[in-house]
Amino acid sequence: MLHIVLAESALELVPQQLWNERSVLASAKSKGKHPSQILLDRSLHHSAMLKLKDSLRRGRPDLVHQAVLAVTGTPAYLRGEAKLYIHTYVNLVIEVAEKTRLPKTYFRFQGLMEKVLSGQKEELLIVKEMKVDELIDQIGAESVIGFSRRGTLMEPEEWVSRYVKDNTVFVAGGFPRGGFSPDVTKKLNTMVAIHEMSLDTHVVLARVIYDYERLRRRV
């Protein structure tokens, strides 16, 4: 089984600190919801977010959606050979049931995430309070590979043959900039860069899952 962890994702409900901000109130009103029930979104709440800690790493649910689609459209996922976990900045984990297809349109995805993060039950999505290192411990995989530009540049044949085991975790950042926190890096067996350029998370995931599927049969 391949376990894919989207770590420290920029996916969260608007924090209480911003509930009374004009931009937040406006977007909440447009949805007929309380500010506590809508996603933090930089495209809507940029000025308000300047007051937040780590503001540049937060409020990008669109980035998370792109990464989710990159995973859930792969043959490995569709065959039930890969499982997805979305770990968020505020240390919630959304465990996605195997083979579950999440919405392809952003607005439906946004509505689903607002629902489950607000505490409403969804049969195929389990939300738990959990730090990323606790999640990796719970998975209990034989090998944990992080993908980051800050890692060691390797060709696919090298990292697959050296680090992929029968039960492996791939960790990719669900944030728009910066690197993994110490909670992540301390759990990695290795950190791999797949290109000299800084690539979007959905591109990284699409490429590494493809290489995993292509080369795993040879090892």
Image: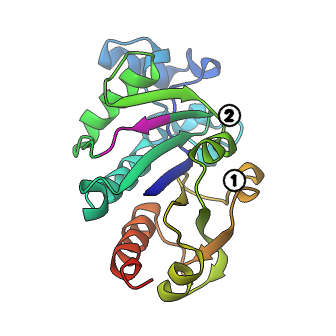
Left or right: 173 as drawn, with respect to 30: right
Between 16 and 27, the one lying in front of the other is: 16
User: At 36% across and 50% down in the image, what residue appears?
Assistant: 68
Residue 20: x and y in percent read 56, 14
Cα gap from disc 1 to disc 2, whole angstroms: 22 Å
User: At 67% across and 60% down in the image, what residue appears?
Assistant: 179
Residue 139: x and y in percent read 56, 46
User: At 24% across and 55% down in the image, what residue appears?
Assistant: 78
Category of crowding for the residue at label 1, using alpha-carbon neighbours closer than 10 angstroms: few (below 14), some (14–19), many (at least 20): many
State the extent of the magenta-drawn residues as a range.
94-98
Q: Amino acid at mark 2?
A: Leu
Q: Earlier in the sequence, mark 1 or mark 2?
A: 2
Q: Amino acid at mark 1?
A: Val
Category of crowding for the residue at label 2, using alpha-carbon neighbours closer than 10 angstroms: few (below 14), some (14–19), many (at least 20): few
Quarter holding residue 43: top left
SS for dot 2: loop
User: At 32% across and 29% down in the image, what residue appears?
Assistant: 112
Identify the image quadrant of the C terminus: bottom left
- Magenta residues, dominant SS class: strand
SS for dot 1: helix
Task: Identify the image's colour scheme: rainbow, by chain, secondary structure or one colour.
Answer: rainbow
Quarter holding residue 162: bottom right
Between 212 and 86, the one lying in front of the other is: 212
**Residue 98 visible at all:** yes
Identify the image quadrant of the N terminus: bottom left
Q: Which residue is mark 1?
A: 184
Left or right: 163 as drawn, with respect to 105: right
Q: Which residue is mark 2?
A: 52
Give above or below for 146 relative to 102.
Answer: below
**Residue 60 visible at all:** no
Quarter holding residue 147: bottom right
Between 135 and 90, the one lying in front of the other is: 135
